[in-house]
Amino acid sequence: MLIQKLTNEIVNNLALKIKYINFGQNNLNDDIALTLANMVDNCKMLEVLILYWNQFKNYGAAQIVGKLKNHTDIKILDLGWNLIGSNLLEQPTREEVISNQLPLKGKWRTDFFKNNNPIVLELGCGKGEYSVGLAQRNPNKNFIGIDIKGARFWRGAKTAVESKLSNVFFIRTQIELLNYIFNTNEIDQIWLTFPDPQIKFQRRKHRLTNPNFLSLYKNILKSGGIMHLKTDSEFLHGYTLGLLEGMSIKPLFSNHDVYKNKNAPDEVVNIQTHYESIYLKVDKKITYLSFSFND
């Protein structure tokens, strides 16, 4: 890791000389906090430490700040745009998930959100724009965004912190591990927003609406729970419709150009991701499909 190498270089060769360190906008999190804290402790001449726009939470920030107590020359410490004071993001390892080390399975309402409101998932949430948008519009529902790339949804977590939202949360994990994180019948709705259509035949098992994934979603959804698929891919829309027909499932709503449909649900056309807004500017069609599984 580049930051690890840089901190080692600073400690070994520059500690008594360096006055300015800028590690801002590097997606650093609490995993490297102790390393940075030890580096700071050795840099006795340090005057400026820039760590803004990362993913440090309370623990990481405390480790670093604790080493600055005796630094009489420090003039600027920038920890802005981190996740300090936030309980909006979790990044468990795969091993922690599959060994059932996440105690919230089956207890998301009672132990985390501390209410009995419906739980809505957004899978492959990207920057978390849709999860945050839904949370802002629906204060009486709980929302959880899931993506394997944590560097994406820290933006959504920050927006949630800034907006003081208490009904949205983000988990960095793989979608195929949902059964380890949520109990049977624990989820009320699932959104798939602009997933990779995986058009190539050899990639079909990675399509988020393939039969294996649909079976996974059905297991965690309540009876009558709703699936939403919003995509710019006519292929994925049609592929999913074909699967539903084979399962004798009638869509609740289906449209190949949803922004031109006057009956489109409000939350479908009035919440947009960054890339969706780009697609719309070039008049690219956006499709939408919703359905419930048969009991």
Image: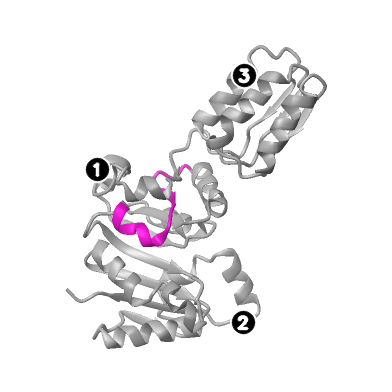
From this viewpoint, which residue is outermost toward the right?
17
Which is nearer the N-term, disc 3 or disc 1? 3
Indicate the quadrant containing the N terminus: top left, top right, bottom left or bottom right: top right
Residue 222 percent across, percent down from the top left: 22, 63
Distance of mark 3 from mark 2, alpha carbons? 54 Å
**Which mark lies nearer to you, 3 or 2?**
3
Residue type at tag 3: Lys
User: Residues in magenta?
Assistant: 164-180
Residue type at tag 1: Thr
**Residue drawn at (41%, 71%), measured in percent from left and top?**
208
Q: Which residue is mark 3?
A: 67
Distance of mark 3 from mark 1, alpha carbons? 38 Å
Q: Which residue is mark 1?
A: 110
Residue 139 percent across, percent down from the top left: 37, 51
**Which mark lies nearer to you, 3 or 1?**
3
**Which mark lies nearer to you, 1 or 2?**
1
Q: Which residue is mark 2?
A: 283
